[in-house]
Amino acid sequence: MTASISLRGAGRTFGATRALADVDLDLEPGVIGLLGPNGAGKTTLLRLLATALPPTQGEIRVLGRDPEVPAERTGIRRRLGYLPQEVGFPRGFTAFAFVDYIALLKEWTEPAARHAEVRRALDQVGLSDVATKRIRAMSGGQRRRVALAQALLGSPPVLILDEPTSGVDPEQRVTLRTVLAEIARTSIVVLSTHQTEDVAALCERVIVLDRGQVRYDGQVTELVRQAAGRVWLADQPDPAATVSWRTGTGRYRNVAAHARDGVEHVEPSLEDAYLLLRGELPDSQPAKEVAS
Amino acid sequence: MTAALAPARPGAAADRTTFVALAARETRRFAVNPVFLFAVVMTAWTTWDYRKAPANAVGTGNWYPWIFLGGFGMMATFWLTRSMRDSEPVVGVTPTTLPARTAALCTVAIVPFLCGVLTLFAFLHFHPAGARVYGAFSPPAQVAVLVGQIVIPSLGGPLLGVALGRWVRFPGAALVLSLILFGWVNVATFGSLSHPDSAAFTALRLFSPFAFFTYMNNAADVTTWRGSPWLFIGWQLALCATAVLVALLRGADGRVRFRVTRTLSIVLVVAAILLVLAATGGFPHAVHA
């Protein structure tokens, strides 16, 4: 049986604000990147998938179960790892104690097995050596990794991660990519991030949200390919460019909506493609020149 | 690609196993809470300190267990209940539901309850039943008075703290409620002293979870107030059950919500009946000894 998530016409409103509307998606095992500007609906979508929030329209099925039915919702939660955008920690807890507490709530009742699993999860995020340190005394990046460790408990078939690498140092980000890639061999990993390099490095598929709607859903390579011939370096910002910024070499990277000849083209990145896509969306107004 | 739909961990345990393990975890967290430890020490110290003060034994000495085990116990469980509030985005999507977590928190009240039982035994050791200080009550009724004053508040205060923690956002809610109850008990007590036969003060006193049934009016005169200590215990237990059910209502949905609401309705009716019976039972008027 294939592990899958499906959304049909799913949406969510908060009072008069429409956070997400008419989303149709089918998600299969692998790492799926979720990109979009602030307020695009990424976190709302992840909260719907994580059963933290019910949809106000449409339907969602996670591993064939309906999250609106209490018993089925519990069934989903037994197979779910969720890292929210913001996690607070109780006073006085060490990293081990916190992850161990969550493991208990995830029904790891046998102490020896639970402790072994907690140690494994902390090891995956590189926190074995500070497992007994109080969380309040940890750095922001370490706290983020504690929160990630609880999501990795039990290698769940569905892993929902909201900005997992936020505040994490580059070395740990590479380690986490390895961990997530391994988990994604059998699990659905949905990853929301503002780090396009994480998506480029990890994901085969990317979904771009804007104002609560899906604007792009496809292969990362296909999105990048659409930017081919539309990115070039020059000594000055090009007036024809949609976006341009000064790079570390002192030259300007120009990204334009239309292909341009007679310039020094460079290989487009996912970030270029994303900026182009954003620029093409109605009412989108990306900054003309981005600070380097 | 395919993914196994096996549980996220080997050998999924029954809900009951998780509940027992979680209740044990919360009980350990409660037992080492500094506020609760302070309450235990103060209860032991005041009980010991009042062992040779029979003239004030019922009227003063047993205020302390309910102040410390009940009032401070309420603050400790309130803190314990709120301690995971910031982690709710994570905790809230685990298979252990909020009502199950609340039920596990309620079980920690066993600890202060047992402390209350020990305090009762100590109190009876220092002031055996039958002493004049207990007024006109029979020895079993004297024990009932003490159970209502020492043991049940040690259970009810912490349970009230869980309900408050689940429903009230204000961080000082437990402290404020403790002070309100303290003030209420004082008003009811002093009102009963000045008007021992007053039906209004009887109702007010019985509505206070820590009310008294007897008091030293002065060094030579004990007044036993109207009302039934036995039925008062029933009324207090109904209040404890109400606190548990109100706490469980938070986050309950579907069948669980229906069952909790139905049980709460029944308990409230039983509580009202017990309140009336407690007020009308026992001595029909104050008795001086």
Image: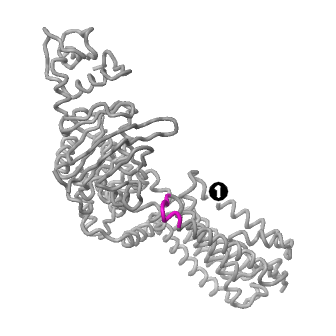
**Is A194 in front, or is B213?**
A194
Instruction: Specify whether B1 is left or right of B53.
Output: left
Figure label count? 1
- The magenta segment is B251-258
Q: Would you say B177 lies left or right of B84 here?
A: right
Q: Nearer the viewer, residue A266 or B35?
A: A266
- What's the magenta bit mostly, secondary-structure-wise? helix
In the picture shown, does residue A180 fall above or below A228? Answer: below
Q: Check residue A55 for magenta coloring.
A: no
Question: What's the residue at 27%, 64% (across, down)?
Answer: A115
Front residue of this view, candidates B158 and A219: A219
Q: Residue at x 48, y 61 (%)?
A: B254
Quadrant of the image containing the C terminus of chain B: bottom right
Vertical comparison of A34 with B283: above or below:
above
Q: Which residue is mark 1?
A: B176
> Dot 1: within a 10 Å radius of its alpha carbon, few (fewer than 14), some, or many (20 or more) residues?
few
Position of B15 relative to A60 (above/below): below
Q: Please provide percent x and percent y for residue B83.
A: 47, 56
Examine the rendering and report whether any part of residue B76 can be seen: no
Quarter of the view holding residue B41: bottom right
Task: Give the vertical position of B40 relative to B53 (above or below).
Answer: above
